Image (cartoon, rainbow, N blue to C red):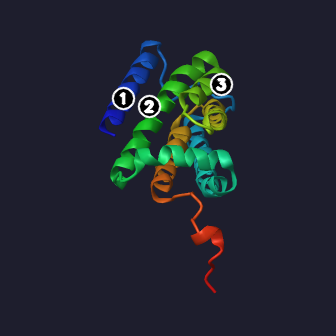
C-alpha cells in the first residue's frame, strides 16, 4: 500500500506540473455552462456528491446481482484484506487526486472527454472474467467525471465523487465476502 501511495503522489505531482507547464490550472477549465467561479464550484460539488452517493449506494446491489461485479469483487478482495481503514481512506484520496488531475485536469482540456475516459477505463484492468465489464464501468464513470468537469469548469466534484466512491467501495470490498454461503450436503440438511 505504501508503494501505491508513492505512485499516486508522483502522478499528482506530474499531472499538476504538466498542466501548469502548459499554462493551465489543473483544477479548472472553460465551462460548457455559463457560470461564475463560485457557481461552477458549487455545481461541480453538487453533481459530484450525487454521482458519488448514487454509485456507493448501488455497489452492494450490483455485487449481489451481477456475475461480473461479484467476480471483480472476489478478484480484488485479497488486495485489501486486513488493510486498516485509515490506509484505505489514504489510498482512496491519493488515487482520486492522481487520476482526476491526470485524466480530467490534464487530458480532458487537451483531448476532449472521450479519449481520456477510455484511457481511464483501460487503466482499470484486472485479470479474469470481470476484465471487460470493469473496464466498461470505469470508462462510463470516467465519462461522467469528465462531463461534470467540462460542464462546470471545476474539478472539485469529480475529485470528491471519486474519493468517496473509492473509500466506500474499498471498505465494502474488504469487509464483505460475496461468495455464496456453503450449506452442509448441498443444502440437504436444513435448520428447522
For marks 2 and 1 on the same chain, the one whose residue lies earlier in the sequence: 1
Few, some or many residues within 10 Å of mark 2 (<14, 14–19, 20+): many
Q: CA distance from mark 1 to mark 3?
A: 24 Å
Name the element at disc 3.
Answer: loop
Q: Do the residues bearing badges 2 and 1 touch, measured as CB atoms within 8 Å?
A: yes
For marks 1 and 3 on the same chain, the one whose residue lies earlier in the sequence: 1
Name the element at disc 1.
Answer: helix
- The residue beneath circle 2 is 98
Residue at image position (69%, 32%) is: 33
Residue 179 placement (x, y as % from top left)? 57, 57
Image height check: is 14 above or below 96?
above
Q: Nearer the viewer, residue 104 or 139?
A: 139
Q: Nearer the viewer, mark 2 or mark 1?
A: 1
Q: Do the residues bearing badges 3 and 2 touch, measured as CB atoms within 8 Å?
A: no
In the rendered structure, find residue 7 and report the number of the disc placed on it: 1
The answer to whether one can see residue 154 in this image is yes
In the rendered structure, find residue 113 and report the number of the disc placed on it: 3
Residue at image position (61%, 53%) is: 59
Q: Quadrant of the N terminus?
A: top left
Residue 36, image quadrant:
top right
Q: CA distance from mark 3 to mark 2?
A: 17 Å
Image height check: is 184 above or below 115?
below
The answer to whether one can see residue 160 in this image is no
Amino acid at each position: 500500500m505504501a508503494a501505491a501511495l508513492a505512485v499516486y503522489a508522483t502522478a499528482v505531482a506530474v499531472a499538476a506540473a504538466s498542466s501548469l507547464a502548459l499554462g493551465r490550472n489543473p483544477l479548472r477549465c472553460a465551462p460548457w455552462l455559463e457560470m461564475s467561479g463560485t457557481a461552477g464550484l458549487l455545481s461541480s460539488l453538487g453533481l459530484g456528491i450525487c454521482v458519488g452517493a448514487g454509485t456507493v449506494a448501488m455497489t452492494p446491489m450490483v455485487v449481489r446481482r451481477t456475475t461480473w461485479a461479484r467476480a471483480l469483487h472476489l478478484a480484488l478482495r485479497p488486495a485489501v484484506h486486513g488493510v486498516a481503514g485509515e490506509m484505505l481512506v489514504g489510498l482512496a484520496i491519493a488515487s482520486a487526486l492522481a487520476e482526476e488531475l491526470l485524466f480530467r485536469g490534464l487530458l480532458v482540456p487537451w483531448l476532449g472527454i472521450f479519449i481520456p475516459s477510455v484511457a481511464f477505463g483501460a487503466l482499470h484492468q484486472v485479470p479474469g472474467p470481470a476484465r471487460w465489464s470493469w473496464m466498461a464501468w470505469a470508462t462510463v464513470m470516467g465519462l461522467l467525471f469528465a462531463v461534470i468537469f467540462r460542464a462546470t469548469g471545476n474539478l472539485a466534484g469529480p475529485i470528491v465523487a471519486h474519493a468517496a466512491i473509492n473509500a466506500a467501495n474499498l471498505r465494502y470490498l474488504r469487509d464483505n465476502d460475496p461468495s455464496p454461503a456453503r450449506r452442509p450436503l448441498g443444502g440437504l440438511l436444513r435448520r428447522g
